[in-house]
Image (tube, grey):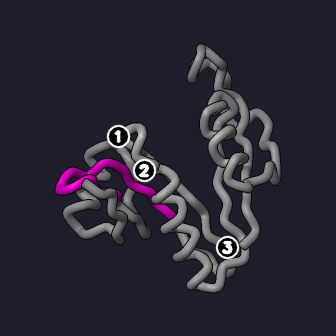
């Protein structure tokens, strides 16, 4: 079966919200056959597009890469010159993923979280890394 990505429907938005994510204002959903296997939520603001959330339920099928490609194409078609997002400092896998696809560190927002919550690999969540790719 092939992976397909399309704009989210109202039913998809309910699914995204059921997973604990906000699905507005815009989203793409990835399907493997009839099964939803991931999503990307984004927001267009002038010539900037912000990637708000991504989620993949099926490893090994390039779900995140396919969703990112769809968001990038949408941003370009809307005249955006910058695609950006923030990751918490514990998200080493995300940092690796986005840098391998041409994203760059644009800013470090220090102490945006209290640090009392442990994230991946028991790393205290304290900071947000702002990543961007210029379109």
- Pair 3/2: label in front: 2
Q: In this view, does 15 lie above or below 69?
A: above
In primary-sequence order, the first of circles 3 and 2 is: 3
Disc 1 designates what residue?
58
- Which residue appears at 27% of the width and 53% of the height? 32
The region drawn magenta spans 30-42
Q: Is residue 66 left or right of residue 51?
A: left
- Residue visible at 62% across and 18% down? 116
State how far apart marks 2 and 1 are (Cα): 7 Å
For marks 2 and 1, the one nearer the N-term is: 1
Mark 3 residue crowding within 10 angstroms, few (<14) / some (14–19) / many (20+)? some
**x then y, percent, for residue 105:** 80, 49
The verdict on residue 56 being magenta is: no
The reply, left or right, for residue 86 in relation to residue 63 is right
Which label's residue is closer to the chain start, 3 or 1? 3
Question: In this rendering, which labeled residue sits more in front, label 3 or label 1?
Answer: 1
User: Residue, x 24% and y 54% (percent of image)?
Assistant: 1
Identify which residue is drawn at 57% across, 22% down: 120
Residue 40 position in % (x across, y down): 45, 57
Residue 22 is tagged as none
Spatial CA span between label 3 and label 2: 23 Å
Indicate the quadrant where residue 75 lies: bottom right
Residue 102 in which image quadrant: bottom right
Say which residue label 2 marks.
63
């Amino acid at each position: 079966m092939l992976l397909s990505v399309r704009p989210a429907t109202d039913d998809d938005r309910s699914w995204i919200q059921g997973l604990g994510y906000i699905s507005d204002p815009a989203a793409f959903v990835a399907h493997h056959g009839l099964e939803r296997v991931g999503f990307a939520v984004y927001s267009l603001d002038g010539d900037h597009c912000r990637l708000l959330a991504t989620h993949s339920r099926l490893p090994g099928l390039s779900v995140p890469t396919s969703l990112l490609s769809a968001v990038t194409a949408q941003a370009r078609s809307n005249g955006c010159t910058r695609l950006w997002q923030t990751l918490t400092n514990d998200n080493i896998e995300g940092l690796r993923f986005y840098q391998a696809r041409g994203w760059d560190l644009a800013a470090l927002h220090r102490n945006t979280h209290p640090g009392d919550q442990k994230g991946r690999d028991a790393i205290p969540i304290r900071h947000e890394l702002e990543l961007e790719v210029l379109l």
